[in-house]
Amino acid sequence: MRGLVFNPGQLLKNTRNKIEHGIESLEKRIRENVDIAKYVIPSALMTALSSTMYGRIGYYGSRAIIYNRMSKGKIEGKWDSKTSLIVGAISGAIGIVMGILASDIYNLTHQNQDLYSIIQHDKEIINNDNVIIQQQNQRLEQDHLIISSLEDKLNNATQTINIYQKTLNNYSNIIHQLQEQLKQYNMTISELRNENQNLQEQLNRDNITISSLEDKLNNATQTINILQSQLQPLQNMKTLEGILYGKGNSYDISIIQIDSVKIDNGTAHIEGTIYPSGYEIKLEIPESYVENNGVTIQDIFNAAQQNNWYSYIVIDRGDLQYLNLLNNQSNIPVIAIQPNESVNIGVIATPADPFKTYYVLNHLTNYDIVIQDGIPMYNSSLKLWGYTSGSSVVINFSNNYQYNLAENMINIADQIINSPNNPNPTSEGIIYTYSIFEGTINTYQNYSQYNVGQTYVPLIVLESKKGNTIINNVSS
């Protein structure tokens, strides 16, 4: 529903129409009265009557009658003739005068007052309308100012719209150009996709070829690696020291895990792996360096395999002068020990892996070393008797695992020497059972007691007929 809207122009127009309508109505009433007067009183008679006081009274009386009739409604019908009208008017005039003088003065007076009140009321209405008109004019002026301001804003907005329209046209042109470029790009992309598909197909074919070549390359790489592992000792380590100890290695002892043993014509042919380098090597050692009173390196190797232990050859760096690197047709270097030289060499068996054995043997001064005789202590489940520097000592193990390893070592040694001329390994000195460990020392019933720590390596050592046992004699 729309609200009421004040329209000053329409109000002014309505007021003007109202005033004009009132004036027209008044003129119409006057014209009707004049027309009536023409029929009632001819102009000559009216002039004569109006020249005297009674005539004027009659004249006004007639007008009063006319007005009275007019106030009750329009005069209906027409007169028969002017003469009858005149006669009637004259007689009526005389009677009217008397009536006015006698009784109608009061009515005419009050009617005149009513007309005066109406006129005054209309004047007030007109004055109020004038005030309203002035107010509306002021509002119209304000509205004109507002409209003028709005027209200015409209003009500015129109100019801005025109500018935006021009900009929009420019953008439309740019968009059109970009659309054309996009079409070209799409065509280029389509061509590139086709080319990419062709390249992908070619790539798939190439991948098949590459895969085949990679397989061949892997096979060739494996072959090269095998050859390099065989050539590495000769390529990177030209000397005995390089082969046995490697570059930058300052340790004194090199260990070689024994892979196979064959004794032929007084020479032990040994194949093994050097640690920590992992290179393969062959040794040719006179049997006297790896044998004592019928017990040989072959016996140590066989016993170690049967009990899942490792067996090693140990060589001291200080004896490199007594070693020879032999010319050989194979890629595995062959090292020979010169006979009749006092070299430090060891033949050992142990459950310790090559890396741990390598580290322990190169740090012997940091460990305690005792020789076990295998006799348990009375009422002591974790203790065994042993020897060090010719004196009896007590070995106190930390746990059952260490204790069982020690007993296992002694049992293996007994198996090895259970042959003629080997009744007792500890007294005869053919096989020694060493315990190497970190620990502390205290006294047990006037005996030195060695308390074994977490690090424990049981070691079976063959006391060689020729040369020095590695445990007792090293260059360091």
Image (spheres, rainbow, N blue to C red):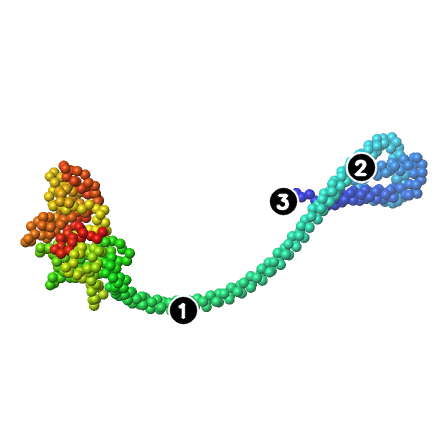
Residue 60, percent from left and from top:
88, 37
Label 3's element? loop
Packing grade of label 2 (10 A; few <14, some 14-19, many >=20) is few
Visible residue check, residue 402: yes
- Sequence-wise, the earlier of marks 2 and 3 is 3
Q: What residue is disc 2 on? A: 119
Q: Amino acid at mark 3?
A: Arg
Label 1's element? helix
The residue under the point 14% across, 37% down is 446
Q: What residue is disc 1 on? A: 198
Q: Amino acid at mark 1?
A: Asn
- Sequence-wise, the earlier of marks 2 and 1 is 2
The residue under the point 10% across, 43% down is 375
Is 186 or 398 nearer to us in this picture? 398
141 relative to 271, above or below: above
Cα distance in 3D space between marks 2 and 1:
109 Å
Displayed quadrant of residue 70: top right
Q: Amino acid at mark 2?
A: Ile
Visible residue check, residue 208: no
Q: What residue is disc 3 on? A: 2
Mark nearest the camera among 3 and 1 is 1
